[in-house]
Amino acid sequence: MTRTGRTATRGTPQEQLLRSLRARLLGGFVVVATLAVAAFGAVLVTWDTRLASARLDTELRGAASRAAALVYLDDNGSTNVDGVADDEVAGGEFRIVVSARPLGEILLDTAPSGSDNSPLPTPQIAAAALADTSESGTYAVLPTSGGSVRAALMPWFDDAGVGGWVMAVERGPRNHSSVLFWPTVIGGAVLLLLLSLSGWVLTGRMLAPALRSAADRERFLATAAHELRTPLARLRGAAAAIQRSQRPGSEWARQASALVGEVDAASSVVDNLLLAARIDNARVDLRLEALRLDTLAADLELRVPELVVDVHGPVTVRGDATLLRHALSNLVDNAIRHGRAGATGIPVLLRVRAHGEWASAEVIDSGPGFASTEPPQPYLSTGGGAGLGLPLVEWVARQHGGRVELTERADEPGAVARLVLPAIAA
């Protein structure tokens, strides 16, 4: 025999449900928080990168503008760049290039001789710099052997107008990524961790009252069921004793028999309510074992006088004897109460069969059948009533890998409620 359900390592089903719900809530929260932190980090890094690029362009433009201001014509009318070469701008962090015209002579280049990272602007960029009479700056990205460098060009002026261009350019390729990238990644991870821990604690505190409420409700239902069962059992015993003491067929005997039936129906309702409450709270333990479905039906026949059982050979299934007995009792009780309307003395038939890999227990009555041709409602019963019986039977069937089929009789009025379960070898 194997057992599934509550274990010492996993905790009670309610605790498992709480952990599962907390995990789902936390998972959703972490996903949303991760997207929010990632979006904020991306915006922050992008903004910082653009600010860094803007600061670099401003510094390049300032160096080019300073160098352009230091170019002048000497007394002989020749272009003199000594002021640029002697100024601190020539020895600064940027390379300075002074040219006379777009394709003219390079008057000054502060790059080290033989350097591989000494690109010059294309003629188009140089022409754009010469046309920049407003001195707003012409910016370009120049390729080098190790990557690319950022440059800013400014025109310089002589007596005739624009005499050439001055370029300030990075001396070597740089990493222009934001310095906030790794701090943002590490800080975001720490923030997510703290948010996750806070979310786990908060969800636990929010769900704890619901767990206590469910446990209190189950304890109340269990206590109420126990308190109801005791007087019902005493009432049934008294009614059965009166029935036995009276002459068969007398009015007192009929009334006592009817009282016994009503007490049995009330006991069934109490059992159904208790099982339904335990299902809602996921507190039903399954004890699965190989058992004879035909034997359960035969035992039921001994307890229900209106029932006739038809069995052809042994029918073995793997299931929980208590739950399957409860399911069969509900089907039979439903048929007896609702399925014999308009009939006199016609018993309810319980037919147990094995069909290859499946076993079935069919409860067949001669009543009006199901009141509607629409799909059965959650609490439908034969005769048009409503109750817990059939939904509980369907739940038991699902727990055993089976199903419930509700059909009309083809040959005569009546209904067929079929419990189908996986069969195993006898």
Image: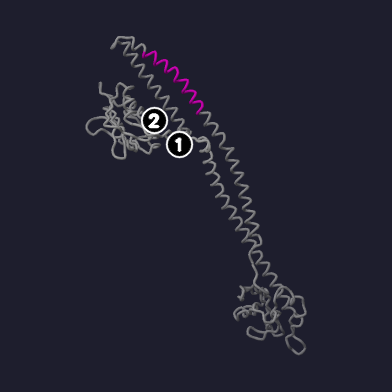
Is 165 part of what is drawn in magenta?
no
Looking at the picture, tell me which residue is in the foreground, 93 or 358: 358
Image quarter where the N terminus lies is top left
Q: Is residue 193 left or right of residue 385?
A: right
Question: Magenta residues?
Answer: 218-240
What label does residue 321 carry, if any?
Answer: 2
Q: For the point 32% across and 12% down, which residue is it?
A: 253
**Figure disc tally:** 2
Q: Tag 2: residue type?
A: Ala
Q: For the point 52% across and 31% down, which residue is it?
A: 214
Q: Is residue 341 left or right of residue 286?
A: left
Q: Position of residue 139 (x, y in %)?
A: 63, 73
* 1 to 168, vertically: above or below: above
* 321 to 84, vertically: above or below: above
Q: Position of residue 135 (x, y in %)?
A: 68, 75
Q: Is residue 335 left or right of residue 21?
A: left
Q: Tag 1: residue type?
A: Thr
Structural crowding at the residue carrying mark 2, measured as other residues with C-alpha within 10 Å and reported as few (<14), some (14–19) or many (≥20):
some
What label does residue 4 carry, if any?
Answer: 1
Q: Are marks 2 and 1 in contact (CB under 8 Å)?
A: no
